Amino acid sequence: MTDAEFAARVIAMQDTLYRVSTTILPRLCDREDAVQSAIEKAWRKADSLREPDKLKPWLVRILVNECHEVLRRRKREI
């Protein structure tokens, strides 16, 4: 998968990613950070994705893990 294909597919999934983050994170700024971080991690590891048609569930799983990481960091701050 080329960078342009990856970018086009991520842009098409952007609404889904924000909806998923909304179900986990209450604060808007945390949601935005989690989505951006998940996209960055997926882009860096895109070559490890064996089946390009599985990009959506793969990226959503990365996002869920990132949201949980944000929650763990928030607990340490309080």
Image (cartoon, rainbow, N blue to C red):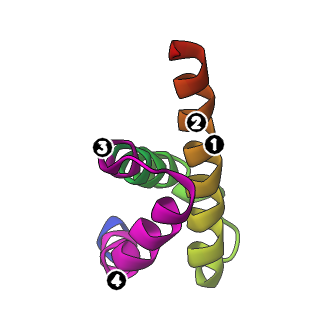
Which residue is tagged 3? 29
| Secondary element type, mark 2 | helix
**From what the image shows, is residue 60 above or below residue 44?**
below
Contact flag, marks 1 and 2 (Cβ < 8 Å): yes
Mark 1 surroundings: few (<14), some (14-19) or many (≥20) residues within 10 A: some
| Secondary element type, mark 1 | helix
| Secondary element type, mark 3 | helix
Image-based side of 41 in relation to 75, left or right: left
Q: Amino acid at mark 1?
A: His
Pointer 3 or 4: first along the chain: 4
Pointer 3 or 1: first along the chain: 3
Q: Residues in magenta?
A: 6-32
Which residue is tagged 2? 71
Percent across and percent down for residue 29 are 30, 43
Q: Amino acid at mark 2?
A: Leu
Contact flag, marks 3 and 2 (Cβ < 8 Å): no
Percent across and percent down for residue 39 are 42, 55
Contact flag, marks 3 and 4 (Cβ < 8 Å): no
Percent across and percent down for residue 50 are 70, 69
> Nearer the viewer's eye, disc 1 or disc 4?
1
Name which quarter of the figure residue 2 lies in: bottom left
- Disc number placed over residue 68 in the picture, else none: 1
